Image (cartoon, rainbow, N blue to C red):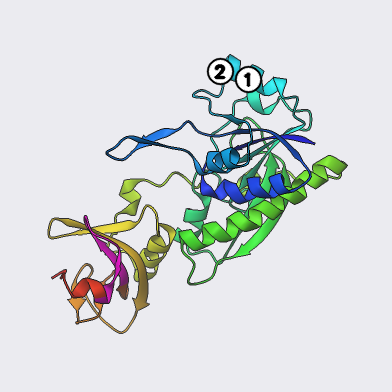
């Protein structure tokens, strides 16, 4: 079985590694172009490219996915299957190339959370269970027939970082199982019920700003869903503070946005109940525990 793998971020690396260590031939790896980062304009690779280069895999980095030269190059690999994990939307001219099709790994139990940020939205909405789905690509995004699904428990202490890593590891196993089913011709496809679909749009800066008139539980879940990246924030005294970890407190009664401090603790009033801030990052400074923050800063 010859495979072309499409992926860019860290989420895709365990999947690629699992395929690489298996018995399948990776004809090429397709990832995003290199970028210049920082003041020194140092060129950085995507995490997927890092893995591919270290393991001497052929790497393609097209600027445009419908470029004729790129499409011809893909055809010339004569791959049996394309696998897509955390990559851009592929045009039909690309995903219809391999004879066994192209499938995607998605970070939700489809048709729930179709879109760019399924893991974040499951936390923001306070879900207790999420999951992973492999499905064959169709022209309409995230709507293809499903191959396999796996449920993932969301623990109370999970944030985006921990859930991301948990799902990435589980996704590697699910993709590998999916490849075997396709190879053996044992796939039992399941259509998605569009009436049960829900969106998972891209995370915007506006979404990241905390509204203290919301209930404490809603704000707490927003912070979990955006920690450690990009981070929920609020503005105080003309400065921006990012919050990474909180705890709901129903004993302290404060008006929404009102702050109370001790030598070690920070409490903020919400629409319902209050939140204790456990990890905070002042603008231009490092992330720190509240006790450390209070030794040199104050929000009041």
Helix, strand or loop status at disc 2: loop
Q: Find the magenta span and give its range.
A: 278-291
Locate residue 230 relative to residue 292 in the image: left or right.
Answer: right
Image quarter hosting the N terminus: top right
User: Which x, y percent locates residue 46?
Assistant: 49, 40
Magenta stretch holds residue 64: no
Query: For the residues marked 1 and 2, what is the alpha-carbon distance in whole angstroms?
Result: 6 Å
Instruction: Determine the image quadrant of residue 210.
Output: bottom left
Estimate how packed mark 2 is, as few (under 14), some (14 to 19) or many (20 or more) residues with alpha carbons within 10 Å: few
Q: Residue at x 65, y 17 (%)?
A: 72
Residue 71 shows which numbered tag? 1
Q: Nearer the viewer, residue 243 or 251?
A: 243
User: Which x, y percent locates residue 258?
Assistant: 19, 71
User: Which x, y percent locates residue 17?
Assistant: 65, 48
Estimate how packed mark 1 is, as few (under 14), some (14 to 19) or many (20 or more) residues with alpha carbons within 10 Å: some
Instruction: Determine the image quadrant of residue 227.
Output: bottom left
Locate residue 292 relative to residue 24 in the image: left or right.
Answer: left
Instruction: Determine the image quadrant of residue 239.
Output: bottom left
Q: Nearer the viewer, residue 151 or 175?
A: 175
Evaluate whether residue 200 shows in this view: yes
Q: Nearer the viewer, residue 89 or 127?
A: 89
Q: Are marks 1 and 2 in contact (CB under 8 Å)?
A: yes
Relative to 290, residue 114 above or below: above
Residue 278 shows which numbered tag? none
Locate residue 32 relative to residue 21 in the image: left or right.
Answer: left
User: Which x, y percent locates residue 292?
Assistant: 25, 74
Relative to 259, residue 14 above or below: above
* Residue for badge 2: 67
Image quarter hosting the C terminus: bottom left
């Amino acid at each position: 079985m010859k495979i072309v793998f499409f992926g860019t971020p860290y989420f895709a690396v365990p999947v690629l590694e699992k395929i690489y260590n298996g018995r399948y031939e990776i004809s090429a790896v397709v990832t995003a172009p290199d970028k210049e980062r920082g003041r020194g304009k140092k060129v950085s690779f995507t995490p997927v490219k890092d893995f591919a280069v270290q393991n001497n895999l052929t790497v393609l980095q097209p600027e445009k996915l419908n470029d004729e030269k790129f499409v011809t190059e893909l055809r010339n690999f004569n791959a049996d299957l394309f696998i897509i994990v955390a990559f851009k939307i592929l045009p039909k001219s690309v995903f219809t190339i391999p004879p066994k099709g192209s499938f995607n790994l998605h970070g939700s139990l489809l048709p729930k959370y179709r879109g760019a940020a399924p893991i974040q939205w499951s936390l923001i909405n306070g879900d207790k269970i999420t999951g992973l789905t492999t499905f064959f690509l169709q022209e309409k995004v995230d709507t293809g027939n499903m191959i396999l699904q796996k449920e993932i428990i969301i623990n109370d202490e999970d944030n985006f970082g921990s859930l991301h890593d948990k799902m990435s590891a589980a996704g590697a196993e699910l993709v590998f199982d999916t490849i075997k089913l396709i190879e053996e011709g044992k796939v039992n496809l399941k259509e998605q019920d569009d009436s049960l679909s829900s969106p998972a749009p891209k995370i915007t800066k506006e979404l990241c700003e905390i509204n203290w008139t919301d209930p404490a539980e809603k704000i707490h879940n927003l912070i979990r869903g955006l920690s450690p990246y990009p981070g929920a924030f609020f503005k105080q005294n003309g400065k921006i503070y990012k919050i990474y970890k909180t705890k709901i407190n129903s004993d302290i009664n404060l008006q929404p946005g009102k702050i109370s401090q001790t030598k070690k603790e920070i409490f903020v009033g919400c629409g319902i109940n209050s939140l204790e801030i456990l990890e905070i990052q002042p603008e231009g400074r490092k992330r720190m525990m509240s006790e450390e923050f209070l030794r040199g800063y104050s929000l009041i």
